[in-house]
Amino acid sequence: MANQRFRPLIWCRKWSKRDQAIAAAATGFAIFIITFSVFSDSRTKPSAQQPLNPSSTPLWVPLTLLRNATHRGAFCLDGSLPAYHLQKGFGSGSSNWVLHIEGGGWCDTILSCSSRKRTELGSSRYMDGQVRFSGILSQELSQNPDFFNWNKVKIRYCDGASFAGHPESEFKNGTELFFRGQLIWETLMEELLSIGLSNARQALLSGCSAGGLATLIHCDNFRKILPKYATVKCLADAGFFLNVKDVAGHRTIETFYQDVVHLQAVAKSLDKDCVARLEPSKCFFPQEFIKNIKTPIFLVHPAYDFWQIKHIFVPDESDPHGSWFKCKLNIDNCNPSQMEVLHGYRHSLLKVLSEFQQNKEGGMFINSCYVHCQTWMTETWHSSNSPRINSKTIAESVGDWFFNRQVAKQIDCPYPCNPTCYNIGFT
Ligand SMILES: *[C@@H]1O[C@H](CO)[C@@H](O)[C@H](O)[C@H]1NC(C)=O
Ligand SMILES: *[C@@H]1O[C@H](CO)[C@@H](O)[C@H](O)[C@H]1NC(C)=O
């Protein structure tokens, strides 16, 4: 395919150890420093196509371009076709579906959206031809006990606005940027419905970071397009972006979201009740609309969300002397007063979530780790040394909630009390 560019190989296989998982995250971290973006799966791919054998591991899943996007006009930022990776379910999972929307921050200006056009977050021309499915997308019973044999879809993110942009705000003057997030969502759902999703018995829409936010935004729509008899739920991983002032008292994230929402005319995709009540960009914050979502929701969220602390709570501009630099690289480096500030961030999160905690159909896993997304890596999702609360892994808690096995509302004690944490760290 002409628009699948293959990059040189970097071999770093066998992701069975904690150190290597952290190293993988560190690769992502380098990207954050340059752009205001959230990490996506940065693992590399093998040089040759490997046959898709359901019993072999690791499993590489090829990229599928969304063909119908051409006549629907559902394009990535640069005008290329959106894409996804699909692995068919098997055995008792054949009519169940788990979807995972990848993350990658947002673009808030013509300039930042234009630079995104030259990356996999704005164009399928730069996406890997195949990716490895792990964590919630793993097909191994031992790594993914409840969803391993479901149909699995990894949705690639290339619109820069959590699948919520609208073409009305595109420029008519030669600035070539497509704001088609909502159309991509609709066209993709149409395609998935046509290949079996319309007969789903059980379905879980999930996503990490900006994809976790997209999950919350589109959750009720996902419920609506599936059969009435189906069990449908949504899982947002690190998608609960908190509206807080940063350490210098600036409204960094609020201003940023205002720019994203205005640039891409996102308001039309946001919760109607919220938009009627508030300035639309505020409705991009889950805390303003989560109570209006009717479909059952699970939140996986680190109380010391590494990305939010780095970009929202202590952005470089609000730390001109760099006194937070070492602390942001490694939470163990934070001095007592910085730790107090971070505990305050956790406190704000828990306060905002106190109402959701009463939701009978909801679930949560709020661990006290310094990390960002935790559902797509086997190391954090479900393995012998994964993070746990009350001895449950994230996968076990999500399964307890999805199948109504037991109430799953796990809130960890404050950092550093939990020795099972994966903390992002750089030496
Ligand atoms: C198009 O219009 C936008 C918004 O007014 C402006 O920022 C941009 O520079 C214009 N682009 C060109 C190529 O004139
Ligand atoms: C593609 O679009 C056409 C026309 O809108 C529609 O009839 C068809 O079902 C679509 N196919 C898929 C796979 O979504």
Image (cartoon, rainbow, N blue to C red):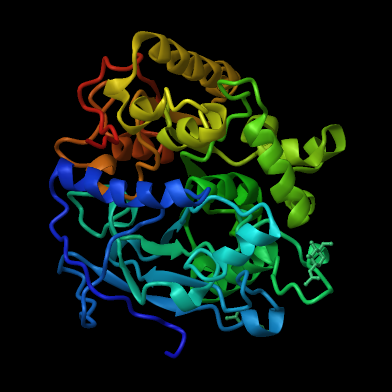
Residue 325 falls in which quadrant of the image?
A: top left
User: x and y percent of residue 221 in the render?
Assistant: 66, 53
Q: Quadrant of the C terminus?
A: top left
Name the residue at 20% across, 53% down: 141
Q: As drawn, which residue projects farthest toward the front?
A: 321
Q: Is residue 323 above or below residue 49?
A: above
Give the residue drawn at x 38%, y 64%. Answer: 151
- Residue 232 visible in this rendered orientation of the protein: no
In the rendered view, does 74 fall on the left or right side of 361?
A: right
Q: Quarter of the picture for ligand 2?
A: bottom right
Q: Is residue 305 left or right of residue 130?
A: right
Q: State the residue in front, 139 or 91.
A: 139
Residue 384 is left or right of residue 42, and the answer is: left
Query: In this view of the protein, can residue 329 be seen by the observer?
Result: yes
Residue 67: x and y, percent? 56, 83
Residue at (46% x, 51% y) in the render: 34
Is residue 18 placed above or below 46 in the rendered structure? above
**Of residues 137 and 70, which is closer to you in this image?**
70
* Outermost residue, bottom side: 2
Q: Quadrant of the N terminus?
A: bottom left
Relative image position of residue 219 (x, y in whole percent): 60, 48
Q: Is residue 426 above or below residue 418?
A: below
- Residue at coordinates 30% horizontally, 61% vertically from top-left? 133
Q: Is residue 294 left or right of residue 390?
A: right
Q: Percent position (x, y) of residue 293?
A: 65, 38
